[in-house]
Image (cartoon, rainbow, N blue to C red):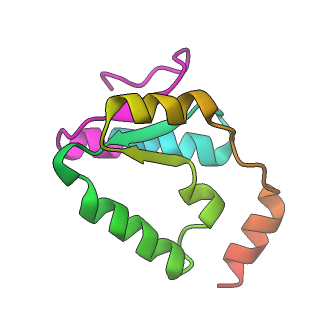
Amino acid sequence: MNFIHLNVHSHYSKGWGVGTIEEIFEVLTWAQLGIHQKPCGFLNVCNYFKHLVEFLDHMVRQNFIDSKHRSLINIAEDPGVLLNHFESYVPPVYDKSTWALRMSNI
C-alpha cells in the first residue's frame, strides 16, 4: 500500500491501475466501518473514473451501497476542487446497527 496511511488528512486516487483501485476501496471500507473519518476521493482527470462513478451510482440505485456510504467518495476533475471538497468534508453520521439490519433484509 504505497499511499494509504492512517495519519494523513485525506486519501485520494489519481488514475492508476487495479491495485490502486483496490487500495482506495479498502480505505473507503475503513471509512464505512468508522475506522477513520477522513475524506476520500478520485481525481477524475479526463473522465478516467466516469464509468466507475456510474457503477457506484448504479449500486446505490440497486441498494448494494447506502447513499450515505456513496457520499464518502469525493470526485472532481480539478485538483483544487477536490481539495476544497476535502477541506469542507463532514463525515456522514449513521447508525451501524440499523444499516446492518436493513442490509440483512435485502
Q: Is residue 11 left or right of residue 35?
A: left
Q: Is residue 100 left or right of residue 38?
A: right
Who's the residue at 52% across and 36% down the image? 85
37 up-or-down from 72: above or below: above
**Residue 8 among magenta residues:** yes
102 up-or-down from 76: above or below: below
Q: Could you say which is closer to the camera, residue 11 or residue 89? A: 89
Q: Could you say which is closer to the camera, residue 101 or residue 37? A: 37
State the image coordinates of residue 51 (x, y, percent, origin top left). 25, 65
86 up-or-down from 69: above or below: above
Who's the residue at 42% across and 76% down the image? 58
Who's the residue at 33% across and 45% down the image? 22
Quarter placement of the N terminus: top left
Who's the residue at 74% across and 76% down the image? 102
**Residue 70 among magenta residues:** no
State the image coordinates of residue 21 (x, y, percent, origin top left). 29, 45
21 up-or-down from 95: above or below: above
Classify residue 56 by image quadrant.
bottom left
Quarter placement of the C terminus: bottom right
- In the orientation shown, which residue stands out farthest toward the top? 7
| Residues in magenta, as a range | 1-22
State the image coordinates of residue 73 (x, y, percent, origin top left). 49, 48
The total of numbered circles placed on residues is 0
State the image coordinates of residue 94 (x, y, percent, origin top left). 78, 55
Classify residue 31 by image quadrant.
top right
* Magenta: main secondary structure: loop
Q: Could you say which is closer to the camera, residue 18 or residue 81? A: 81
